[in-house]
Image: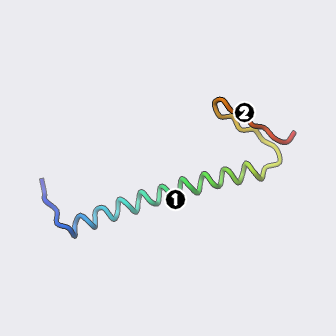
Amino acid sequence: MIVLDDKQLKKMYGKMITTSALLGYLAIAAGIAAIVKILTSSKGRVSIPGINISWGN
């Protein structure tokens, strides 16, 4: 096993945190886009197990 010094550890974890943060922001943005699309549509239907919501005609 290779022992890493502090500088190498910071460099490695910095990339992982950045990638994780990017994926998190992407997931949040996709969720917000889906909610906006649902709220601005004139009619639609959402089905989640146990919940059925429909609006419009």
Q: Nearer the viewer, residue 52 or 15?
A: 52
Q: Relative to 2, does residue 49 appear above or below in the rendering?
A: above
Mark 1 = which residue?
25
Q: Are marks 2 and 1 in contact (CB under 8 Å)?
A: no
Residue 52 % position (x, y): 72, 33
Q: Quadrant of the C terminus?
A: top right
Q: Nearer the viewer, residue 51 or 47?
A: 51
Residue 3 % position (x, y): 13, 59
Residue sitting at x 30%, y 61% = 13
Residue type at tag 1: Tyr
Report the residue that reaches farthest toward the right: 57
Q: Is residue 50 left or right of residue 18?
A: right
- Image mark for residue 52: 2
Residue type at tag 2: Asn
Residue sitting at x 75%, y 38% = 45
Q: Relative to 9, does residue 32 appear above or below in the rendering?
A: above
Within the image, what quadrant is residue 29 found in? Answer: bottom right
Residue sitting at x 40%, y 63% = 18
Q: Residues within 10 Å of mark 1 (few under 14, many from 20)?
A: few
Residue sitting at x 66%, y 50% = 34
Residue 51 % position (x, y): 69, 33
SS at badge 1: helix
